[in-house]
């Protein structure tokens, strides 16, 4: 694992979604696993890293737990505000911090990733999907962008 990876050999899978815990976690985890394993199957013989919002709750936490189980590298990509959330940050292998407030990192995040998975989520998650679509305008996104809804229990 200590060897340097060539960029083309690593597939960066971005995951966005609810960052709080009031949602159907069981369904979200199932949908997330199905999509991530499908992406891996579609791109064999690569190294994989899962890139999410760094916080230790919500969809990012589900994504990181799955990535650890699948032996993927984990990347926390967020603004420095992530260090101040009550739930703390997930113990990722790599940290990328851009800006001060949540959302400051959105443009850099979508430029960093190769694929994007959205599981539910609020305005920031949906904005990042829009940015990803604009960045890859005119390209076939059927195997690069995955969106699923899950039930939100919060207010």
Image: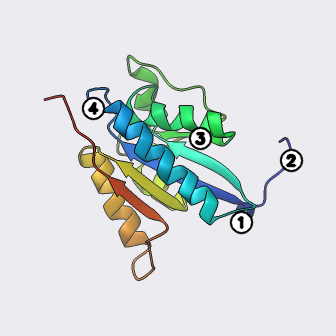
Height in image: 147 above or below 65?
below
| Residue highlighted by disc 2 | 3
Height in image: 67 above or below 154?
below
Quarter occupied by residue 9? bottom right
Q: Residue at x 79, y 54 (%)?
A: 5
Secondary element type, mark 4: loop
Secondary element type, mark 2: loop
Q: Residue at x 60, y 65 (%)?
A: 42
- Label 3 – label 4 distance at C-alpha: 23 Å
Q: Which mark is residue 8?
A: 1
Secondary element type, mark 1: helix
- The mark tally for this picture is 4
Height in image: 108 above or below 56?
below
Locate residue 117, reporting x and y percent. Answer: 43, 53
Depth check: give the residue in front, 111 or 70. Answer: 70
Q: Residues within 10 Å of mark 3 (few under 14, many from 20)?
A: many
Which of the two labelled residues, at mark 4 and mark 1, occupies the earlier sequence position?
A: 1
**Image quadrant occupied by the C terminus:** top left
Which of the two labelled residues, at mark 1 and mark 3, occupies the earlier sequence position?
A: 1
Which of the two labelled residues, at mark 4 and mark 2, occupies the earlier sequence position?
A: 2
Which of the two labelled residues, at mark 3 and mark 2, occupies the earlier sequence position?
A: 2
Relative to residue 75, is residue 29 drawn left or right? left
Relative to residue 125, is residue 91 drawn left or right? right
């Amino acid at each position: 694992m200590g060897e340097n990876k060539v960029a083309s050999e690593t597939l960066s899978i971005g995951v966005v979604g609810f960052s709080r815990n009031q949602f159907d976690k069981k369904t979200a985890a199932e949908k997330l696993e199905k999509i991530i394993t499908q992406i891996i199957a579609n791109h064999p013989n690569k190294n994989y890293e899962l890139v999410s919002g760094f916080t230790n709750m919500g969809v990012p936490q589900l994504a990181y737990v799955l990535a650890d189980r699948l032996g993927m590298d984990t990347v926390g990509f967020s603004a420095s505000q992530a260090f101040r959330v009550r739930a703390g940050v997930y113990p990722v292998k790599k940290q990328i911090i851009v800006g001060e407030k949540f959302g400051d990192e959105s443009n850099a995040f979508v430029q960093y990733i190769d694929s994007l998975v959205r599981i539910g989520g609020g305005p920031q998650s949906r904005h990042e999907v829009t940015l990803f679509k604009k960045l890859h305008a005119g390209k076939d996104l059927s195997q690069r962008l995955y969106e699923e809804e899950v039930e939100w229990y919060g207010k």
